[in-house]
């Protein structure tokens, strides 16, 4: 493995730990999908995760109205922020002196929300220098850069001290890594009694094996979706004991059905809708205690 570093506009960034991580860094450095940027522009919280909750058809109004598309974008964004709020609900009691870790932080929307809610420090790691720069720029604009920081760093090998973190999460970022390696690292930096939360898409062992739709999602995002069984086994092996498991599949379907009608479709909508409907894929939240 090489430890060579490359310079970016803002910082020295570590060389990718593996060729695959180099692919993922490139993928997110080049990502600029309107579905993510236009939704983020609604209120300055930029997400790379999906939405949950019922669609507010009253807010959307008449599809023939000239303002309908703008309202649809705001509604999709509201559902994505609602997803992050539900994740934060499961972090347990967090005080202003606590530190949280967002593993695979994207453009940092969830980190801003966590700081606003708890007043705490939030450390984000991403493979993408473009995402880290974007998140740090937003934090400066919001004057919260003393509390919210993104860095280019492998979530499997972080600089956070053993037992120093009150709570941590993966929001749709665990499908890029080996789960044993991931949970070993969370378990290392979490304090005993701390909380780990993930919201993720996983394939359903009751279906048998990953369906063609799951394979299509993997190919689309260059990721490797794990099964629900793998999550529970890897947590058990790494001192993370599930306290709450919520099947969010019925709650995310309305988001996808609405998104499929928008001008911002990316082509992956059908795979999510069909796999959620046929039971081969599930959208789950798992909150675990570090014991
Ligand atoms: C789908 S995005 C999710 C972003 C964010 N959690 C959110 O909810 O908006 C996946 C993120 O995982 C990050 N990621 C993937 N593998 C990683 C790794 N080994 N270390 C750090 N970040 C990683 C990517 O850089 C990207 O930021
Ligand atoms: C639930 C699963 C399997 C997620 C895979 C990871 C992923 C790419 C999430 C959304 O990112 P995004 O917000 O950048 O995607 P999109 O452009 O489709 O909105
Ligand atoms: Mg998105």
Image (cartoon, rainbow, N blue to C red):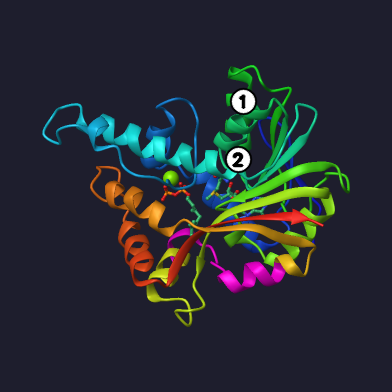
Report the residue at 63% width, 37% height from top: 132
Residue 32 shown in magenta = no
Q: Position of residue 104 (x, y in %)?
A: 63, 48
Range of the magenta residues? 219-234
Q: Position of residue 238 (x, y in %)?
A: 78, 65
Query: Horizontally, is 220 left or right of 3 in the view?
Result: left
Disc 2 to disc 1: CB gap under 8 Å: no
Residue extending farthest bottom: 208
Report the residue at 57% width, 45% height from top: 87
For label 2, the crowd category at 10 Å Cα-Cα, with few meaning under 14, some 14 to 19 and many 20 or more, is many
State the SS at label 1: helix
Mark 2 / mark 1, whichever is N-terminal: 2
Q: Could one spot residue 248 in this view of the protein? A: yes
Residue 230 shown in magenta = yes
Residue under circle 1?
Answer: 116
Residue under circle 2?
Answer: 88
Query: Horizontally, is 264 left or right of 180 in the view?
Result: left
Question: Which quadrant is the N terminus positioned in?
Answer: bottom right
Q: Nearer the viewer, residue 290 or 25?
A: 290
Q: Position of residue 181 (x, y in %)?
A: 75, 64
Label placed on residue 205: none
Q: Could one spot residue 2 in this view of the protein? A: no
State the SS at label 2: helix
The vertical placement of 205 against 69, above or below, is below
């Amino acid at each position: 493995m090489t430890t060579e570093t490359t310079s970016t506009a803002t910082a020295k960034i570590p060389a990718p730990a593996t060729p695959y991580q180099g692919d993922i860094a490139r993928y997110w450095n080049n990502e600029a999908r309107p579905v993510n940027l236009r939704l983020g522009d609604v209120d300055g919280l930029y997400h790379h995760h999906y939405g949950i909750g019922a669609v507010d058809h009253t807010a959307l109004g008449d599809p023939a109205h000239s303002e309908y598309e703008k309202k649809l974008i705001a509604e999709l964004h509201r559902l994505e922020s609602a997803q992050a709020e539900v994740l934060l609900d499961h972090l347990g009691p967090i005080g202003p002196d606590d530190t949280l870790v967002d593993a695979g932080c994207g453009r940092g929307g969830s980190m801003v929300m966590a700081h606003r809610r708890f007043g705490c420090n939030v450390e984000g790691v991403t493979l993408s220098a473009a995402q880290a720069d974007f998140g740090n720029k937003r934090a400066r604009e919001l004057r919260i850069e003393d509390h919210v920081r993104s860095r280019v760093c492998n979530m499997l090998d972080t600089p956070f001290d053993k037992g120093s973190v009150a709570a941590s999460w993966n929001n749709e970022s665990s499908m890029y890594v080996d789960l044993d390696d991931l949970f070993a690292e969370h378990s290392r930096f979490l304090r005993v009694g701390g909380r780990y939360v993930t919201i993720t898409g996983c394939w359903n062992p009751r279906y048998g094996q990953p369906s063609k739709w799951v394979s299509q999602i993997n190919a689309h995002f260059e990721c490797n979706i794990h099964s629900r069984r793998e999550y529970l086994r890897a947590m058990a092996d790494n001192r993370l004991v599930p306290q709450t498991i919520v099947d969010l599949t019925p709650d995310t379907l309305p988001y996808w059905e609405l998104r499929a009608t928008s001008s911002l479709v990316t082509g992956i909508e059908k795979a999510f809708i069909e796999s959620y409907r046929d039971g081969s894929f599930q959208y789950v939240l798992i909150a675990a205690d570090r014991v």
